[in-house]
Image (tube, helix red, strand yellow):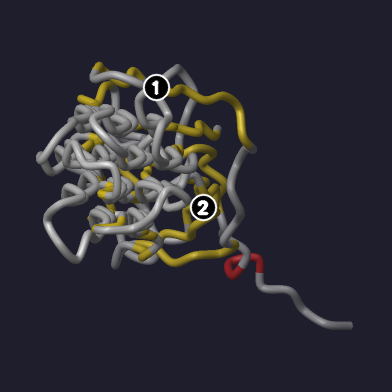
Amino acid sequence: MATIDLGKIKLVWRGTYNNSTAYTVDDVVEFTDGGILSTYICVANSTGNNPSSGGTAHASWNYMTKGAVTGGFTSKQTFTSSGTYTKPTGISLIKVYITGAGGSGSGGADSSDDYGGGGGAGGTAIKYIDASSINTVSVTIGQGGAGVSGQNHGNAGGSSSFGSHCSAGGGGIGVHGNHGQVRGGKGGNGSGGDINIQGNAGGSGNDGGGIHFSGGHGGGSFFNGGGVGLNRNQNNGGQNGDKGGGGGGAADSNTSGSGGDGFCLVEEFK
């Protein structure tokens, strides 16, 4: 009959990790790191050392089982203007989408056959953030470029940011219809995200075209399309962009479309 040495059976379950508790070799705890609940075994006496950070175990601990996200999607918050994000109780992970503002379309140069370029869309950054140490974050939402008329280029969109975690540049400007080589505005870029997306460029206008031509369309953002450009004899202003989309270019003496203001979406997970 086999002999069991009880001295070798010495794992001790200590429950959820507590930063003020003194742990000894072969203590076992559970701990949530970046929204992932795992179990760890102590391999060197330790006090005040979290078992892991950013998915890497501390030297005093080894993984026993590496778990999965502890809870699914719970709630969301959106921002269409600058403000403060406040994390609800119990949230351990957030996914942030931040989009810069769109640039406006440009003027048609007061001429019957000149059409302005469309504004570029704002860029977007998408980032997963461990929210365990977050309470509030300042959110900046860029303003869309204002529409213009006549021989005026458009106005660039403003940048948006989610604290220091990630940001997104605004869309660039189209050029007015009498400028020659009437290009649209460049798209802005995301920065600091796990995924960074460039906004679409605005469409080109036309210098010296006929009645069936139109101003350039605004570039589309991650969240929405840009505004359509105007053709001759349309007496309303160019179409505005939305949620970072660029404004459409103008024809004749009409006003071009404004760029859409930036946008932020925060998805919250337990």
Q: For this rendering, which residue is in front, 158 or 6?
A: 158
Amino acid type, callout 1: Asn
- In percent of width and height, residue 147 lies at 23, 29
Which class describes the residues within 10 Å of circle 1: few (<14), some (14-19), or many (20+)?
few
In screen coordinates, is 239 left or right of 74?
left
Secondary structure category for the residue under label 1: loop
Residue 112: quadrant of the picture: top left
Secondary structure category for the residue under label 2: strand
In space, the residues marked 1 and 2 are separated at their CA atoms by 70 Å
Amino acid type, callout 2: Val
Q: For this rendering, which residue is in front, 168 or 89?
A: 168
| The N terminus lies in quadrant | bottom right
Residue at (20%, 27%) from the top-left corner? Answer: 146
Q: Which residue is mark 2?
A: 28
Residue at (40%, 48%) from the top-left corner? Answer: 214
User: Is 121 situated above or below 88?
Assistant: below
Q: Taking the image as drawn, is residue 238 in sight? A: yes
Residue at (83%, 82%) from the top-left corner? Answer: 2
